[in-house]
Image (spheres, grey):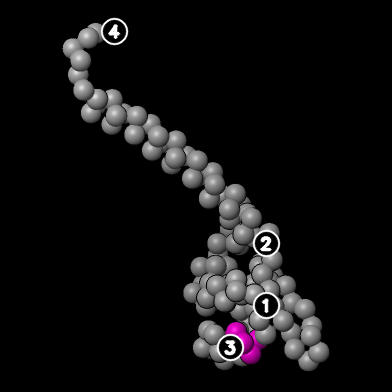
Amino acid sequence: MQDIVFQTLADPTRFRIVEVLAAGEQSVGELVRAVDIDQSGVSRHLRILGEAGFVRMRPDGARRLYSLRPEPFQQIDAWVSAYRKLWEDRMDRFDAAVARRTAPDTGERK
């Protein structure tokens, strides 16, 4: 996976903007109020999010509306899924080992 996805979300303001946009399309003004930074700051973060493929913009008269794109989140999900499978397999083996150790001893040998 490209490092840019994680580098982009590592910034707390961009992470917060993504969280706000998860609720739906927002204008710059709505984002300014939601993240409590000035318009130029929000615009700069939106530009970075756009360059990294996280957001798309559509004009609506004089306003610009921003929404999330699914592709970077699909990349994150694929990356996490690989590790989820690894840990689930390890936990299954651990559960089996614990079950063997705590099973009642019947005294029979196999």
Mark 3 is on which residue type? Val
Mark 1 is on which residue type? Glu
Task: Tell me which numbered mark, 1 or 2, is placed earlier along the sequence.
Answer: 1
The reply to whether callout 3 and callout 4 are in contact (CB within 8 Å) is: no
Is residue 58 highlighted in magenta? no
Q: Which residue is mark 1?
A: 25
Q: What residue appears at the point 28 percent right and 25 percent down from the top-left corner?
A: 100
Q: Which residues are magenta?
A: 28-32
Mark 3 vs mark 1: give the one in front. Answer: 1
Q: What residue appears at the point 19 percent right and 19 percent down from the top-left corner?
A: 105
Q: Which residue is mark 2?
A: 70
Q: What residue appears at the point 54 percent right and 43 percent down from the top-left corner?
A: 82
Q: Which residue is mark 4?
A: 110
Q: Is residue 93 above or below residue 37?
A: above
* Distance in Å between CA atoms under marks 1 and 2: 13 Å
Mark 1 vs mark 2: give the one in front. Answer: 1
